[in-house]
Image (cartoon, helix red, strand yellow):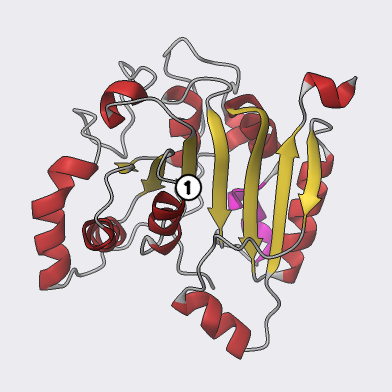
Amino acid sequence: MPTTSVSTTDPSEIDASSSDGASPTHRHVVSFVRRGARMTSSQQRWLSTWGPRWIIDMGWSPLTPSPEARPLDLDAIFGRGGPLVVEIGIGHGESIVARGRAWPQARCLGFEVFDAALASTLGKIAAAQIDNVRLLKADAVWGLTTLLAPASIDELLVFFPDPWPKKRHHKRRLLSPAFVALAATRLRPGGVIRVATDWDDYARAITEAFATEPRFHLESTDRFAGRPVTKFEARALAAGRTIHDFAFRLQTEDDHG
């Protein structure tokens, strides 16, 4: 089972076209289990030292979305414009920090629900000496729908989301047709969503989900060079599991022409 934590509301219960800041009505089905992870002293220090700088303060309980929420002013939050990279479920921060270092012009935004994961990522941001990564403790699907404007994301990263292997739990899987439809509204034309899973059944379900959205084109199934090998992936490989990578690009009007 992957260690990456992903917070999602059931996307089928959200109006993906909403962009006026109104709070959508939804049934709260999430793809994470809230569990208290004890933080180390280093994690506590990173959270207290760097949290105020790199975690976006929404002014209300991050896991209880406010009806007053509006799309984020990312230019003000980052202090500049630039391409937007969003990662859902940052885990310990390896991927989003690597992306921030490799693409300094980009603004990297990570959704995460667990304090220990946020704290570890803060430590990596500080060690990398970069300032183009911001974190948000919030439900990811609600965040994409309400906090990010349509056609605003250049690159969306979803690495090793929980596969929820039991059939009765499949409704909790993030990468469903409803989420694919939502992603198509939030990516810019020509933008890309990169996905990785070590679960064969989930890989098939991902392929089927993206097949429901004709605006997405499967660009590659090669391993994304910008994704570092985490401890979790190394354990999965050692256990003989196959890593499935996908890069789906949102077509432009020229592509249709």
Query: In the image, residue 33 lies at what x, y percent?
Result: 41, 58
Q: Residues within 10 Å of mark 1 (few under 14, many from 20)?
A: many
Element assignment for label 1:
strand
* Coordinates of residue 191 in the picture (x, y in percent): 64, 34
Camera-nearest residue between 18 and 246: 246
Residue 247 drawn above or below residue 183: below
> Which segment did they paint magenta?
166-175
Magenta segment: does it hold 171?
A: yes
Q: Is residue 204 left or right of residue 68?
A: right
Number of numbered discs on residues: 1
Q: Residue at x 79, y 30 (%)?
A: 215
- State the residue at coordinates (64%, 38%): 179
Q: Is residue 28 visible?
A: no
Which residue, as the protein is rendered here, is positioned at the far right? 257
To which residue does mark 1 refer? 87
Q: Residue at x 63, y 25 (%)?
A: 185
State the residue lying farthest toward the top. 20
Where, by quadrant of the figure, is residue 63 drawn?
top left
Quadrant placement of the C terminus: top right
Residue 249 visible in rendering: yes
Task: Label the magenta part by its dominant secondary structure.
Answer: helix
Which quadrant holds residue 244?
bottom right
Give the residue drawn at x 69%, y 62%: 245
- Relative placement, left or right, of 65 versus 246 is left
| Kind of residue sitting beneath label 1 | Glu
Give the percent coordinates (x, y) of residue 137: 31, 43
- Splitting the image into 4 quarters, where does residue 82 fall? top left
x and y, in percent, of residue 13 in the image: 59, 29
Nearest to the observer: residue 66 or residue 215: 215
Magenta span includes 239 = no
Quadrant, the N terminus: bottom right
